[in-house]
Amino acid sequence: MSYRITGSTGEWEIVVGLEVHAQVVSEAKLFSGASAEYGGEPNTHVSLVDAGFPGMLPVLNRECVAQAVRTGLGLEAEINLFSRFDRKNYFYADLPTGYQISQFAHPIIGQGKVLVDLADGSTREIGVTRLHLEQDAGKSIHDQDPTRSFIDLNRAGVALMEIVSEPDIRSPEEAGAYLRKLRQILRYIGTCDGNMEEGSMRADVNVSVRKPGETEYRTRCEIKNVNSIRFVMMAIEVEAQRQIEVWEAGGTVDQETRLFDHVRGETRSLRSKEDAHDYRYFPDPDLLPLVIEQSWVDELKAALPELPEAKRTRLEQEYGVSRYESSVLCVEQAIADFYETVAHGADARLAANWMLGDFFAALNRTGRSIEDSPVSAEGLRELLGLISDSTINGKIAKEVLEDMVETGDSASAIVERKGLRQVTDTGAIESAIREILAANSDKVEEYKGGKDKLFGFFVGQTMKAMKGKGNPALVNETLKKLLSE
Amino acid sequence: MSGIHDFTLASARDALKARKISAVELTNAHIDAIERLDGQLNSFITRTPDQAREAAKASDEALAKDEGGSLCGIPLGIKDLFCTNGVRTTAASKILGNFVPPYESTVTANLLKDGAVFLGKLNLDEFAMGSANLNSAFGPAVNPWKRKDSDAKLVPGGSSGGSAAAVAAGLVLGATGTDTGGSIRQPAAFTGIAGIKPTYGRCSRFGTIAFASSLDQAGPMARNLQDCAILLESMAGFDPRDSTSVDTPVPNYEASLKRGVKGLRVGIPKEYHVDGMPAEIEALWQQGMNWLRDAGAEIVEVSLPHTKYGLPTYYIAALAEASSNLARYDGVRFGERVSAPSLDGLYEASRAAGFGDEVKRRILIGTHVLSSGYYDAYYLRAQKVRTLIQQDFLKAFENVDVLLTPTAPSGAFAQDEKPSDPVQMYLNDVFTVPASMAGVPALSVPAGLDARGVPLGLQLIGKFFDEETLIAAGHAIEQAAAFHHRPTIHAGVSA
């Protein structure tokens, strides 16, 4: 179903393209040796190059280039063996040199694509126009003093990848799915941590609207610097609504840059096209054109980790998990790794079930992530092993897992300590059942009179009497036998 | 101490090694000369006599142990465009205020490593923008030469005017210069000294305040080419901190002096016979050809068809880069700040007060040629023409080893003869700019005096990284020209 907004003149389609700024994971900045680490006391991660001191020159960080190439490979994009750095000139207090070094005419990465999964189970391909490397600016702090602004240059010069999508996105949901998928790919490859709260991933959102069937794009507006997936989706919705109202009132949408105010749920004009900066791009004469070897690209490609799509397909084929399960298990590489460790030598389907169910619930309850999970993959595998070899049953296993989370003890230790070993002694089961049946002779009569669902009652009572330790299959089997006597 | 000011850099070096003179004596003599004469020349912006004496003492200690580098104890002046650790660096601009860099440029670090003694920071045109050293916030440097018939103050050329004046007057044994479109060669010619603009990429630009990054190149200025060769060998070399510096070994330039020019093919670019060139410049050029021919070289006419586009394209390419390079002087982090209620106001007030007229003019032109709607017509076209100019040289060098031309279309002019039209001033660079645009090395050697007794220079242009052939050819001219004239103001002349 196509996403449509209904206005007073009928239905409208939205057209969205995203420019994502993703901070490159690297030790040092793009053109200096200063630390690229997030945080730190203001102005402690700053070299003389970052601060634009006289005579300072940029020197390209090879690792940042490798990260861009890896990302390009992850987006199945063209890798441009020749690219170039340009200066984007504008004055601002947190831009020490008066220009940002970026790639304008010749980006390092060309056309690529991102496959996104939608809620209705369908898949869409969103085109990537390009990816280029550029420097981040510093931070201006205006709220510390009534008359002065402060500048923190810790971020100045940190490497960013600007990833520009084609205007292929047609709904807020698709925008959200695109961003999630992009973030997933970046995290898999390890080129961006995707942390939107810390600003290591931000999006500029280009929105326009048109009537279904129109082939030309109408004028778009750019919403700058939206810093969460939810806000991106909200911003698209309210901006599309605004534009529809403008068109339907007989007006025209002006090309402009806008800001999203999530408190008021509206976008506001920041600057019009007429006020747009003339950035006077030109090739940075301090840097040679960036020429990389195909053999180096091939090396990086060979060392690339398995990407989300490939991993999903493999998990489905290798472990027999469902399409849904594979999508959850592959959200993060660490989860997939954890799963594979658990599933290795265990019942893989059971492992998927437990991960998606009780294990994630335990993580949520304790507020832990997969990386600092209170239960190791090996520990969970041991627990599942105890189910598979009938040492304990599933219900008892839940109790054991809770104990594992709480105490950190191993499953077998807990089973021993608490005496939870499943009772498979048919004699013990039979005597427990006989006691139950004797105490509930009225219900036995009813059951024999055709009230089949009482069977569950007997099972429950038996398990209760056996403190949950009865082997469910044996309990069932024995019950059936004794009830038919 | 008679005779101490007759030393060249090379002879001083040899005298120091032989302990015929101490580094402290040599340095003190130069400090005295600066104190005595620089009031007239204004070639220094900042003098560092105390540091110089300290360094000289250390040099003597090293020399006593037969240690010390190739420049141990040699007093030099540093163009005030090179950042010097702990010593004020101004670029002859108000906007840098009392900026004291906490770092050393690679070129000056190389010289220090080889034992050089720095006497101070030399005057220049503000941000190296000018051809007469009239654009300095610290007042013009003055040419130590005077016309036979007049006491008028002559310009030393620019932008390395202070370097040229100090070397010519014997205040230093050598100096660093930078050359973007002729800023080493033209002042060298105006003051009767030698100067080399090496191949682009030969010397690191790290720590040198940028004018036009794709053209700026540091080089030596000294009394003769032997001194220049010694200095260049120290200054040059690959620097990982400058991505445009080239990783190729630095040869023994001094040794190339002895190569001679037998069989060398010397090209004479016919397009350099420009309209209105004074007859004495033409005559000097012809003289240069004769000298080289007599020394065994072959003279060949060549064509550099795009020469006439050199100047206009240079002033587009260089100023475009300058407009961007100078954006960092904004009053925010260092240098002069004029406070204002808004950020834009702070920029405007600081830059209005900090930059001189010529710098402002060039920033405006550079901003214009890069702006939307003009970029293709100016900047992009200039880049294309630049490629054509480079191809001219490459083609010519298929056939010849070096090119011989005049360095400048005239000798030094008087301060008050400065043309009122800035474009007229730019014509000073007409012969020097093309080599800069191509990135090839070039030098200027003194070759004679004009009718009024003012020195004139000849320029040699060489192949990429073939400074050695250039020096060999230049030395042949030096030997033939036997230029031993001295300027009116000179340390060796008692006041």
Image: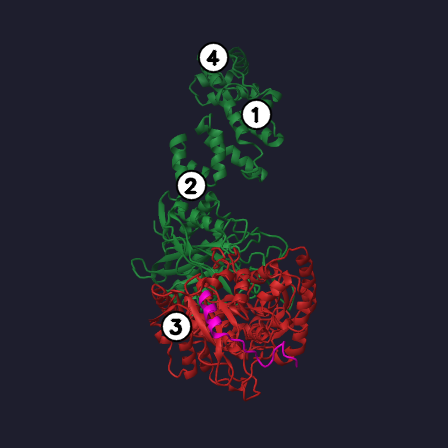
Chain colours: A green, B red
- Judging by the rendered image, the residue that carries numbered circle 3 is B378
Q: Callout 1: residue from which chain?
A: A
Percent coordinates x, y for residue B153 in the rendering: 57, 84
Using the image, tell me which numbered label, if any, was put on residue A411: 1
Q: Is residue A67 visible?
A: yes
Work out which residue is located at the far bottom of the displayed protein and give it. Answer: B149
Is disc 2 on the same chain as disc 1? yes
Q: Nearer the viewer, mark 4 or mark 1?
A: 1
Q: Please state which amino acid type lies under the numbered disc 3.
A: Tyr
Foreground label between 3 and 1: 3
CB contact under 8 Å: marks 3 and 4: no
Q: Residues within 10 Å of mark 3 (few under 14, many from 20)?
A: many
The disc placed on residue A308 is 2
Dot 4 alpha-carbon crowd within 10 angstroms: few under 14, some 14 to 19, many 20 or more = few
Distance Cα–Cα, label 3 vs label 4: 100 Å
Which residue position holds label 4?
Answer: A482
Residues at marks 4 and 1, CA–CA distance in whole angstroms: 34 Å
The amino acid beneath tag 2 is Pro
